[in-house]
Image: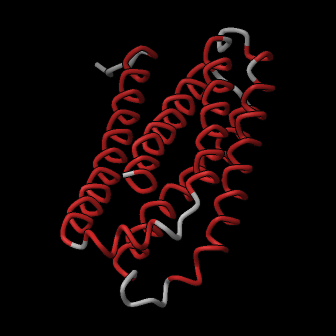
Amino acid sequence: MAMHRSLHDEAKDDQLLLWILVWSELIAFGILIFGFLVVSAVQVEAFELARLHLRPGIAGANTLILLVSGYQVAVAMRRRNELETVKRPLIVAAGLGFCFVAVKLFEYWGEARFTGDATLDSFFELYFMITGFHLLHVFFGAIALLLVAWRPSRENVLLIATLWHVIDLVWLVVFPVVYLA
C-alpha cells in the first residue's frame, strides 16, 4: 500500500523548514551580536572611539527604509489570497531593500578608511562582519521579493514575508547595539 502525502502534510514540512531557517538565522546573528557585546565590554575605550567614526543618522535613515519595506511586505501578506494585488507591494519592498543596500555601501565608503587603524581594528572587523552579513541578507532577500512578485503563490508570500521580517528584526537589534550603545 503506497503512502499518499496530503498537501496539508507538505505545507507543514515547508513551515518546519522555514522555522528552522528563521531560528538558524537568529542564532547566527545572536552569536555575532553577543561577540560584539563581549569585545565592546573588554575594549570600552576603543569601541567608544570607533563609534565616533560611524554615522548613526545614515543608519537611522536605513532603519526607516527597512521599516517601510517591512510595511509593504505586511501589505502583501494581508493580500496573499488575491495574488494579483501582492505584486506591487513586494516590488516596492524590494526596491526599498536595494535602496538600503545602496545607502549602506555609501556608508561603508566613508568608514573604510578607518579599518587600518590598529586601535579600531576589533570594532570595525566585527562591525563589517555583522552589518555586511545583514547587508547580504537584505540584497538576496530583495531578489527573492522580486521573484515572488513575478510568480506569487500564497505559500511563497508567507515564506518571503517571514524571512523579510526576520531581516528587519535583526537590524532593529543591530542598529542600537552597534550605533547607539
Q: Quadrant of residue 101?
A: bottom right
Colour style of the rendered protein structure? secondary structure
Q: Is residue 81 above or below residue 53?
A: above
Q: Residue at x 40, y 76 (%)?
A: 125
Residue at the (67%, 38%) spot, across then down: 145
Residue visible at 42% across and 49% down? Answer: 174
Q: What x and y, as percent, mark residue 87? A: 78, 26
Q: Quadrant of residue 44?
A: bottom left
Q: Is residue 92 visible?
A: yes
Q: Is residue 82 above or below residue 136?
A: above
In-front residue for pair 177/162:
177
Q: Nearer the viewer, residue 116 or 10?
A: 116
**Residue 150 makes an appearance in the image:** no
Q: Residue at x 72, y 41 (%)?
A: 94
Numbered-mark total: 0
Q: Position of residue 106 (x, y in %)?
A: 70, 66
* Residue 77: x %, y % from top left: 61, 18
Left or right, residue 101 beside residue 125: right
Figure quadrant of residue 156: top right
Query: Residue 109 appears at what percent x and percent y?
Result: 67, 74
Q: Quadrant of the N terminus?
A: top left
Whether residue 34 sits left or right of residue 92 in the image: it is left
72 or 1: nearer the eye?
72
Q: Is residue 25 above or below residue 166?
A: below
